[in-house]
Image (cartoon, rainbow, N blue to C red):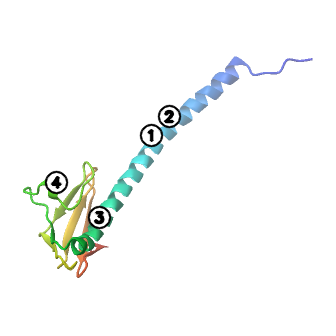
């Protein structure tokens, strides 16, 4: 009865192929995970922007969104994930009754990708900029 099995060369070839596939696939998976994380953070920021009118209405206090250096982070209306920036062309005031005059914001991702959004009055719903 013949002995069945794999030779050392066959095993080495298989291990080499598995290592090669891992070297090619792993960086792509890492990049995919980072892209997914950035998209999730972006969507959270946009969702938070859309809630500011309602938050002002519920609290009965006006909320101001600006990108000035004088903002105190503890009082800033949106908590930004690390590396993200929000630039506001002119301060946007969300009145105590939930109405705002609208404005334009620019969202800058950690990889320096910039997106412009319009906050459309009266409730300042977020829409893609032109």
**Quarter holding the C terminus?**
bottom left
Q: Is residue 91 left or right of residue 116?
A: left
Is there a contact, CB below 8 Å, between mark 2 and mark 3?
no
Foreground of the two, 6 or 74: 74
Q: Earlier in the sequence, mark 3 or mark 1?
A: 1
Please tell me the numbered disc located at residue 48: 3
Q: Which label sits in the foreground, 2 or 4?
A: 4
User: For numbered disc 3, what is the local secondary structure?
Assistant: helix
The picture places residue 1, in percent across and down from the top left corner, at: 92, 17
Task: Please name the residue shown 16% across and 54% down the image.
Answer: 74
| C-beta proximity under 8 Å, tags 4 and 1 | no
Q: Which residue is mark 2?
A: 23
Q: Can residue 8 be seen in this snapshot?
A: yes
SS for dot 1: helix
Which tag is nearer the camera, tag 3 or tag 1? 3
Image depth: mark 2 or mark 3 in front: 3
Helix, strand, or loop for circle 2?
helix
In the picture as drawn, the residue positioned furthest to the left comes out as: 70
């Amino acid at each position: 009865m013949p002995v069945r099995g794999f030779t050392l060369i066959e095993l080495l070839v298989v291990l080499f192929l598995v290592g090669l596939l891992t070297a090619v696939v792993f960086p792509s998976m890492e990049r995919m995970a980072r892209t997914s994380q950035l998209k999730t953070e972006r969507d959270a920021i946009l969702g938070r922007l859309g809630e500011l009118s309602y938050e002002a209405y519920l609290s009965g206090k006006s909320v101001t969104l600006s990108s000035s250096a004088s903002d105190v982070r503890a009082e800033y209306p949106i908590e930004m994930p690390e590396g993200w920036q929000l630039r506001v062309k002119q301060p946007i005031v969300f009145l105590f009754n939930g109405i705002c005059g609208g404005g334009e914001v620019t969202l800058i991702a950690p990889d320096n990708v910039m997106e412009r959004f319009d906050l459309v009055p009266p409730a300042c719903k977020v829409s893609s900029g032109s």
